[in-house]
Amino acid sequence: MKKITPANLVPLLTAALPEKDMAHILNALVQFLRDGGVKRASQRFDLLLDAFKQNPELAREFGTRFHRWLGSIHIYPALVGLGIFSRSGFAREMGIRIYERFMPSFKDLNNLRDVFLYLFQRQNDEKWLHTVSLLQWLSLYDTLCRHSDPAAVQTASRHLEQARLHALEMLSIWVAAEELEPEFTRLEPKLMEVDSAFVALHQEISRLVAHYRSGQTEHYDTAHIAVMMEQCRAQVERLRRKGTGAGAGSSVKVAHLLERLSQTLDRLAVLLDIQTAPDEKECRRHCVRLLNSLTTAAVEQHSTELLRRRSINMLAKSISENTSGHGEHYITRNKREYFAMLASAAGGGVIIALMAGNKIRITGLGLGDFTTAFLAGLNYGIGFMFIHIVGCTVATKQPAMTAARIAEHVEHKAGARALESKLAKLLIDVARSQAVAVFGNVVVAVIVASVVAAAVAAHTGAPMLDAHTAAYQFKSLQPFTQPTLWYAAIAGVWLFCSGIISGFYDNRADYLNLRKRLTVQPLLKRLLPARPRAFLADYLHRHYGSLAGNFIFGMLLGMTGWFGHLLGLPLDIRHVAFSSANLGYAAVSDHSGFLYFLLNLAFVLMIGAVNLVVSFSLALTVALRSRGARIESLSKLIDTLWLQIKANPLSLLFPVQPPAAAGGNGNGGNGSSANGKAKE
């Protein structure tokens, strides 16, 4: 392949110049750079620069035509349209981009916005564009300006300034209008005050625009504008924190509008820097920044993935934040919390044993497959809701909640030297809390199931489970001859989903302000007096996510086997608590030996391990990604964790603290977290 040099690049440029439309000439140059790929785009840009520098006549002709073209096209739409979300919302924006992909719109090449979309429409354009440095762009800009006709440059400059001032005015109006956006005033009622930063910024920019439009040559003092910009950005951050924090509730629409507001402020800042630059060199530097912003925005305009990721990220963080708040209640740090968790898990074990017995009874009714699965789902769903209402604990629900708490800890402590130590201690607290909860669920479920089976046998004179059913229950626990651990992994996925569902509905309750809505609900107003209605509204608001998550989790457990049968796929579930209860019923009914019982109990614990590992891994991954956080050094964390366990091995099973820390950790306001609160 012939090597490209500045000398043989000149004919290519000369051949492109007779083209009447400057946009097509630019497209030929962009294609030349694009063909170099990520590795050679920057080198090809240097060849282009050398070709212009070595051929002043070519640079003069190209630069003059470029500036005349720039002085005649519509620039304003690009300044306010590229790189800034529309107010149409996430769904509408996504629909437009998908439709554009299959049915591209006509590009008006007299409109700079459409020119950018015409030039940069490949997904890989962003990659090679990033290899071209700021100095290379500045060098090209200087070369063309130096050789172009001064009259053409001056005409383009005046045209650009008018478009810039118009864009500044319009963008500042957009910012001021956000003061009355209902989604924002819901998060921050103070926005309705007259002297908000958004309105003040618009007023200052209007004065700046009037100053330059009047023809005054002296630079405008932008000190007050800088203060207003800083206050606006601070207000956006407050809205983000409220939108992603538990208690306010977020939505994709809020995320979309906040991203639009942030983009508008960024564009205002760049345009202000260009307009008020102290010298030509600084002005050109800011112009290149704007060019980079517009080219990147043109590439992103064709991307549905980036829009989805940006818009949904804040909603995911809000859901994770709500989940994290519940996760704190699942962590025991002192003896009082530890025994409260044990009692709560034991209560859960009693109810789970009765739910498992009822599931066996439903299966034995001989109903159709769908009816049996649906009734089993209702049995699980209503049972889990009841466990939550009475303040008991299902052990396997903990990982999805505590993972979000760990992610929050990583995010807030990022960069701290003691991160590994604090995170290791949190992991030990979580492991101990999980262990005592599993112990309470499994042991009590086995005991209660065994007592019930023995009572039924004594009362009826026949075992509760016949030989075939008992054999099936034992067979369902076999991890080596049956897909038991695969089914346990499926249950782990549903456990993870239940945590996400709980966070979603908690976020939904905050977003809708369910507490206030229910107090004025017409039917409830007719049925209940004011005080009971207020109590009910408050309870449902605080527990909306937990109740919804528990019910849907129960339906998923009950219906998975039916869907597997319907689709001919190996789909079913194995849950440690229900498996332990089934073991108790089968062992008493079958009169199996103690060693055989212990072997199957070990299988039950294997099911529990898979339940917990799968749900915890998925929940931690999602929680970390939603916060943009990560564990910097896994090896350091493991080493620190091992050192803490070696120094105090009993801490994994019981909250025994070293003497130095025993007097200083009363856990403050978390002292009652496990007592009646560990129930989601």
Image (tube, rainbow, N blue to C red):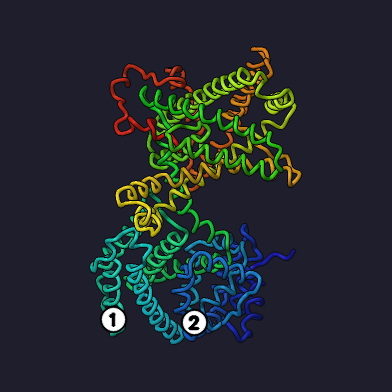
Q: Residue furthest front?
A: 460
Q: Are marks 1 and 2 in contact (CB under 8 Å)?
A: no
Label 1: few (<14), some (14–19) or many (≥20) C-alpha neighbours in 10 Å: some
Label 2: few (<14), some (14–19) or many (≥20) C-alpha neighbours in 10 Å: many
Q: Nearer the viewer, residue 466 or 387?
A: 466
Q: Tell whether 219 sits left or right of 62.
A: left
Nearer to us of marks 1 and 2 is 1
Q: Which mark is residue 70?
A: 2
User: Residue shown at 64%/12% (left/top)?
Assistant: 594
Q: Nearer the viewer, residue 496 or 298?
A: 496
Q: Position of residue 457 (x, y in %)?
A: 63, 19
**What kind of residue is marked 1?**
Ala
Q: Which mark is residue 568?
A: none
Element under disc 2: helix
Vertical position of residue 290 compared to residue 400: above or below: below
Vertical position of residue 73 compared to residue 597: above or below: below
Q: Which mark is residue 210?
A: 1
Mark yes or no: residue 243 visible.
Answer: no
Q: Quadrant of residue 678?
A: top left
Q: Quadrant of the N terminus?
A: bottom right
Q: Position of residue 604 (x, y in %)?
A: 62, 25
Q: Quadrant of residue 596?
A: top right
Mark yes or no: residue 523 visible.
Answer: yes
User: Residue shown at 45%/54% (left/top)?
Assistant: 314
Q: Nearer the viewer, residue 221 or 512?
A: 512
Q: Marks 1/2: CA distance?
A: 24 Å
User: Residue shown at 67%/24% (left/top)?
Assistant: 465
